[in-house]
Image (tube, coloured by chain):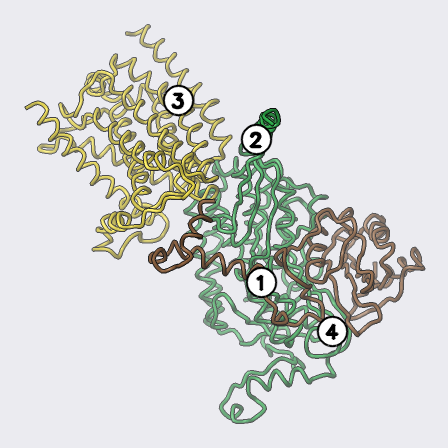
Amino acid sequence: MEILWILVKIIIVFAVVMLHVMYATYFERKVIGHMQVRMGPMRVGPHGILQPIADGLKLFFKEDIIPTVADKKVFYAAPLICLISALSAIAVLPFFEGFAIANINIGILYIFAMSSLASYGVVLAGWSSNSKYSFLGGLRSSAQVISYEIAMGLSLVGVMMMAGSLNLTDIVHAQMNSPFKVYLIPQIIGFFVFVVAMFAETNRTPFDLPEAESELVAGYCTEYSGMRFALFFMAEYIGMIVMSCLAVTCFLGGWSGPFEVPGIPFFWFLLKVYFFIFLYYWVRATLPRYRYDQLMALGWKVLIPLALFNIVLTGTIKSIFG
Amino acid sequence: MPENKSESKQTTVQHMAYEPYTVAMGPQHPATHGVLKLDLELDGETILECKPTVGFLHRGVEKLAENISYAQCLPLTDRLDYIAAMANNVAYSVAVETLLGIEVPLRAKYIRTMVMEMARLTGHLLWLATHALDIGAMTVFLYCFRERENLLDMFEEICGARLTTSYTCIGGVRQDVTGHFLESLHAFTDEFPSRIAEYETLIDKNRIWLQRTQGVGVVSAEDAVSLGLTGPTLRGSGVDYDVRKHMPYDAYPYVEFEVPIGSKGDVYDRYRCRMEEMHQSNSIIRQCIEALPPGPIRAEDAPDLVMPYGPQKVVEADATFSSGIIKLVEDRKRFIKGDVYVAAEVPKGELGFYFVSDGRGVPYRMHIRSPSYIHIGALPFLCKGQMVADVIAIIGSVDVVLGECDR
Amino acid sequence: MEPLEIAQKIRERFPDQVIQVEEHRGQVGVIVKKDRIVEMLRWLHDDPALQLNHLADLCGVDYLAKKDVRFEVVYNLYSIPLRHRIRIRAEVPEDDCRIDSVTSIWMGANWHERECYDLLGITFDGHPDLRRILLPEGWEGHPLRKDYPLDGGGKRWSGYEEVVEKSKRLRQHDFYGMYQDPTKKAGLEDARE
């Protein structure tokens, strides 16, 4: 019975997340469109509301082109690794009180593990395509993800220290009992580091070097087309959603809000997540792209020292007042 | 034989270890601004060598020009720098007028100066749009196109074409400008400085933009002159050379403007030069509108092909389109032997025409000194030791158009 | 400095090299022999009273049946600091169709000279990388010569045939190409290579 309930939960969450991914692309195109004095999709349905469905159908029925010189097995596996690891990370996220598919006690660690796995997909895609641009993209991605993973992990140590747990539900509960109700204020340095690393981790502007379209054509997914390309695309958007959820859970108090919205327990959670997703789009429409060495310098010379400083600061304050 | 085998294997391994990674950037690549091919030799992400290949768009304009009359050559110049065709038209007309010794009426001079500066704006707007997009700031792209669209609409109003204008003719311009055109252009110039400020808020103080452009693709003043760079690309290195000031043509002696000069010669200075130039162009357009004198728009002795206007002229046998050309070819007393080199300042730099006339109505030799060609030739020098992402920034900053480069 | 004065100075400095001075519409061209062209241009570039540091244009002209010496290489020089210009026209005979390269003076002359070599067939001695530039490597003839017909003389570029062949071969990747193209098998083998 327990297993059945979990399966039902998985199906519900999967369906809801996929729907959000679909409409996250629509939302992005609309938001960026309006920021850029244009309308975004307008043709398919009223205000282009059916555009994601049309896109999905198109990508699904496209011819699947595999380069003759590609390493076929790896080429097939790479997008799946990306997608599966991105989807698996959702399992530990608490969407509202008592609702998480797997309420495990190492939630944060698990998410880190899964997002690191996703970078394997990118690296392998770059490698197996046997194309020079893909290869460069894959290399860039591996270097980027490794260095920003450290900054991201360290930025959350402060949160773990304050909450005393790695379980995401416990972190939310700890925040509710803290004086500010959110960890955003005491952990402002950690939050800053986390947000910057979050952009790098999901390969979004201004850190979209692995797929920098003006330099590397499309980076690691240059040789992918049709449904395989769509898998990468979905993985990227799920990654964005997961990172936004993690930020909300760790810094903005998860599902808690100033007042209860009756009947919709995930109202505040969703609102906060969409704020972060909007932030992603906003940044994309505004900022230029970093250069590879500058990106590395920022990660190693600014973010990691900042995160370490935050840990020391948190520890000191905790040992004095706690 | 096994010894040999192992030896050869070893050498290949060693060779592999030091082999640079070669990437063919282009001719189909989003950031090479046309069919430019760059063979990059990389050490990691650092450029060891950059070898440009051009000629994919070579149409033999110079050979074609030797077989058609001066008036017929004019549409060919539209296809050089197709982003700012108006400027090429003016440059060509000025060159032919110098060769033939035609004095253009003042009103035509003002109109030509005005449209040339409009062309400079269209060129610089497209440059800013693509340059920013290459570096990753995609919103500037659409903002720039909004203004460029206004200018192209105005081109359409005065000559019926948006890109391939062929608006000028030898000895003047084809059509007079209307009051409505001048009004809308004046309204545009009122608004445009605030639009430039809008682009600047997005990129000018952006830390990422500064990091990506400052100290990248540096070229010293001496090297820049030696490389033959012209236009804003040269002025970014601090060399005060602008054909509009050095060899004034059309109404440039009568308008006031400054030539912005950079100092460091990096991508950022070239970018600043062009941004300041847009302000100056805007001011020149305003001055031209305000000072536009009345009068004829074509020199009386202009040996251009005459378009039939009224119906009474169409029925005349010698007033058709083709006879106009014949008239031009046979009008021999005007064409004397000699050669001239005349340059004009187009958005990309110095566009020069070298004509050799043998006394016929067709150019004996027409050589086009296209700035883009020289600028691409300078890319190996500029790119050496930079990173892959910088190559994109440098291509953007020297501002090349392949139609002009390949001719 | 007035262009005619510059021409006079050149005549004084290189009396045996200057053949003629021509003026047209206020622009002065000095027709010179090609033998000491690099020395002359270096002097023009370096002399403090001239400082012709900007090579505005370099091109070749074919005077087939118009002049005794068939080719001319034209250097349009301009002085950015002193604001004067001069044109040097070096005569290059058809039977000895070569001239010294000026890339040692102006780095930018590199591509100008390659273009001149490509389109007119004038060889530049001492050029670091004298290859065709606008036309493909295998092109026959030099199109800007006056005896080169406008339509190319009915000849096709050899590379064109290769392109046609290749496009036929690649047709196997069309949607129905696998079933229609009889050269399917050969094409597949090539693609694997």
Residue B80 badge: 1
Q: Residue B226 at what x, y percent from top left?
A: 72, 47
Q: What element carries label 4?
A: strand
Q: The brown chain is which one?
A: C
Q: Earlier in the sequence, mark 1 or mark 4?
A: 1
The residue that mark 2 highlights is B16
Chain of the residue on which disc 2 is drawn: B
Badge 2: few (under 14), some or many (20 or more) residues near its Cα, within 10 Å?
few
Mark in the foreground, 2 or 3? 2
* CA gap, disc 2 and disc 3: 35 Å
Residue B115 showing in the rendered view: no
For the residues labelled 1 and 3, say whether their Cβ atoms are less than 8 Å apart: no
The residue under the point 76% across, 77% down is: B336
Q: The green chain is which one?
A: B
Q: Nearer the viewer, residue B75 or A268?
A: B75
Badge 4: few (under 14), some or many (20 or more) residues near its Cα, within 10 Å?
many
Residue B357 badge: 4
